[in-house]
Structure formats: structure tokens, C-alpha cells
Amino acid sequence: MTDTMAGVTCPAVLHRVAIPELDEWGCADDAGSRFGDDPDLAHCGPDPWAYLNELGERCIRGEGKKAVLDLAAAREYSALKVRLETGGTFHQHYPKPGAEPAWDGPPVPEHCGWPGWLRPSGWQCRQCGAALAMESAA
């Protein structure tokens, strides 16, 4: 099977990894992390909260009747504040469609009329969930 693949969200080179607690396959970057920072927040610098404070100061310029509202800054401030407070500043690594590794080993076992499903723990029937092989796939 191919070891590396391209990601959907970020330019990281991804590798297929086993997720033992789920008995599923996932993707990780070169550092071994299954999650990455969102690339659209790179302009916020190392401290997005400081950038948020700067945006807040830019929202209203001037005082009294001469105050001017910067709608673009206010819009960005609101969106960024929600993302930072809810922790929505990262993504899970997923491969681009068609970039997933294909099985190139021996013939896939069949059960219940369907080809088996390869999990890190081994082959499993897609219909009834029966274990089809004792060998570990990881």
C-alpha cells in the first residue's frame, strides 16, 4: 500500500496510521499528529487572541458623532471570536479523494457475499461483523 498521500485541508504530507481505540485507519502528518492548525488562521500570528484584541480596537474609530464603524473588521472579529471560544481552530487530517491507499496484498476474503473490510486488527465482514482473519493488518 502507498505510504504517503496529499491532504484536503492543508499541504501536509499524510501517512496512514492505525487508531487502536477505534480499530480504524486515520491519517497523520510527519510529526505523527492526526490534527493540524487551520491554514486560514495563519494571518493571526502566533497569538490569535492578541490579533482579536487588535481587531476589536479597529472596529470603531473615532469618538462621538465622528465615530466610524469598520464593518469588515467587525465581521472578522465576530467570526474569529466564535472560532476561538469554541475551539474551532484546527482540523482533522483527511486525504484527498482518490488518494487513499489501495490494498495490493493477497486476495481479499469474502463473507456474506461481500469483500472483507480491512481494519487495523484484521479483516472483518461488512455485513455481520465477523472476524475473517486472525492476523493483524497494522
Image (cartoon, helix red, strand yellow):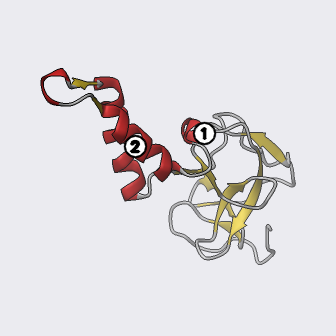
Q: Residue at x 18, y 21 (%)?
A: 66
In the image shown, does 65 or 81 lie closer to the viewer?
65
Residue 125, percent from left and from top: 60, 64
Q: Secondary structure at mark 1?
A: helix
Q: Is residue 69 above or below residue 38?
A: above
| Label 2–label 1 contact, CB within 8 A | no
Task: Residue 56: name its quadrant.
Answer: top left
- Residue 116 appears anywhere in the view: no
Q: Secondary structure at mark 2?
A: helix
Q: What residue does disc 1 label? A: 42
Q: Is residue 128 above or below residue 83?
A: below
CA separation in Å, label 2 and label 1: 12 Å
- Left/right of residue 51 with respect to residue 68 in the rendered view: right
The count of marks equals 2
Q: Residue at x 62, y 46 (%)?
A: 94
Q: What residue does disc 2 label? A: 80
Residue 23, percent from left and from top: 63, 71
Residue 2, percent from left and from top: 85, 45
Category of crowding for the residue at label 1, using alpha-carbon neighbours closer than 10 angstroms: few (below 14), some (14–19), many (at least 20): few
- Which three-letter amino acid code belongs to the residue tagged 2? Leu
Category of crowding for the residue at label 2, using alpha-carbon neighbours closer than 10 angstroms: few (below 14), some (14–19), many (at least 20): many
Residue 137, percent from left and from top: 79, 67
- Left/right of residue 86 with respect to residue 102 in the rendered view: left
Q: Residue at x 80, y 68 (%)?
A: 138
- Left/right of residue 67 with respect to residue 44 in the rendered view: left
Task: Residue 8: name its quadrant.
Answer: top right
In the image shown, does 38 or 42 lie closer to the viewer?
42
- Residue 122 appears anywhere in the view: yes
- Which three-letter amino acid code belongs to the residue tagged 1? Ala
The mark that comes first in sequence, 2 or 1, is 1
In the image shown, does 23 or 48 lie closer to the viewer?
48
Which numbered disc covers residue 14? Answer: none
